[in-house]
Image: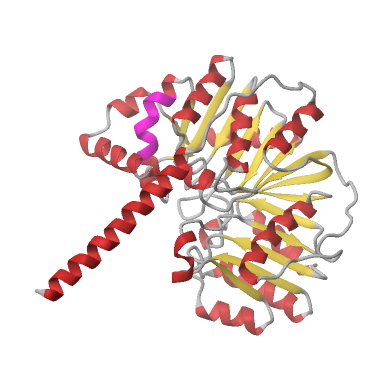
Amino acid sequence: MILGLSIAVVLLAVLSLALGYVLWSRSRIQRGVWARLDPQDTSRDGFARMVAHLSLGSLVEGNAVTLLENGAFWDALRESIATAERSVHFETFLWKAGELSASLVDAFCERARAGVDVRLIVDGEGGKLMSDDERERLRAAGVDLRLYRPRRFAHLGSYNGRDHRKLAVIDGRLAFIGGHCVTDEWTGDAQDREHFRDMTIRLEGPVVNHVQAAFSENWTEVSGRLLAGEDHFPALDHVGEASVHLAYLGDARRVSAVKTLHVLAIESARESLLIMNPYFLPDDGAIEALGRATARGVRVRVMTPTLEATDNPLVVHAMMRELPRLLDAGLEVYGYDRTLLHQKVLSVDGCWSVVGSVNFDPRSFEINEEIAASVFDRALASKIEAAFDADVAHCVRYGLEHAEKRSVGSRLADHLAWGVRGQL
């Protein structure tokens, strides 16, 4: 009797904590706003500076930007690692032991044995499938591997906030930002359901200092050490024409920088807006903002995986609940069916692009550690638009019939998924 009562008390306490946690998370999410944009400086430089400052960054000119798609990113990264002379910094969310991870472990270990400082940050939850052998090999070679908020009681209050960033910095002079994760599905060329679709950009020029600062921020948390000095932050010459700023800073008391960046992208569009995102869960404010864009003549196109192609069916169910509203707001919504479309990319008016780790959902906007590069460069925007147009061939364009013909079971799943969208 006493034992049964004790168990009941424990279960009640656990349920109370869980309910409180969910309510706290929802309160964080509901604090976010989708503000209307006041009249703005219409000059390119003035507008770019405004975007940078409002999303807690600074505009950096004189950069070169290269778009890397699918498995081509890993080829470029391994080549860059092989030439590193001072430092290799790599940060990722998901790591699963396989052929890709083995090749990266080889590359990291080779440089570490050559005297290069190799520092890795892997999310404590997303890195659970990193093998013990990989960890031992890395550490034996001298690689400094740190897990971000691993599952410990000390991290209970912050455990829900994951490190979702995907970035690399080589010698403080070359950087990568995008959506690629370390699993074998991110190799190949998105040719089938076992090989995913994704985009990352390579950055050269002064903005690399800012990517290094983003890495250093989380490195300080996981190691207690601050990266500083010219080895990490060298003076970098102008090498191109792209103006770039990074959005990654956030504060639990305010709207995050990455969310502000997305607000600005939608509210400032005047002709066209492309959104490619694997987890597209716009809230009421976002749908209203997208509707305002179409009302002023902007062609808004969204591409996201179908239920059959996604790795998270609950996200697609939640989106399908809002499909009639999205269509009524004037959006063109495409379901990419070839494989998981994983790039987190926006393109605005053919001149401004956003590429990074940010999903279009409450978790990325309000909870996780994220990073996005805001790039003012027509060449990059043109390549992203061309990729979107090519990928349409592998899409289903959603219409009202796709919502109206859904079964009762599917609609129930849609509503249930929408109710927990903040934790998806």
Question: Is residue 289 rendered to the left or right of residue 12?
Answer: right
Q: Position of residue 90 (x, y in %)?
A: 66, 64
Q: Position of residue 187 (x, y in %)?
A: 57, 58
Please, is residue 222 above or below residue 374 in the view? below
Question: Is residue 97 rendered to the left or right of residue 39?
Answer: left
Q: Depth check: give the residue in front, 261 or 93.
A: 261
Instruction: Quarter of the image for the N terminus: give it.
Output: bottom left
Please, is residue 17 above or below residue 46 in the view? below
What segment carries the magenta color? 317-326
Q: Position of residue 101 (x, y in %)?
A: 57, 69
Specify whether residue 309 is in view: no
Please, is residue 91 above or below residue 294 in the view? below
Specify whether residue 324 is in view: yes
The residue located at (49%, 63%) in the rendering is 126
The verdict on residue 115 being magenta is no
Q: Depth check: give the residue in front, 337 or 233.
A: 233
Question: Is residue 8 rendered to the left or right of residue 207?
Answer: left
The kind of secondary structure the magenta stretch mainly shows is helix
Q: Residue furthest top?
A: 296
Question: Is residue 36 rendered to the left or right of residue 332?
Answer: right
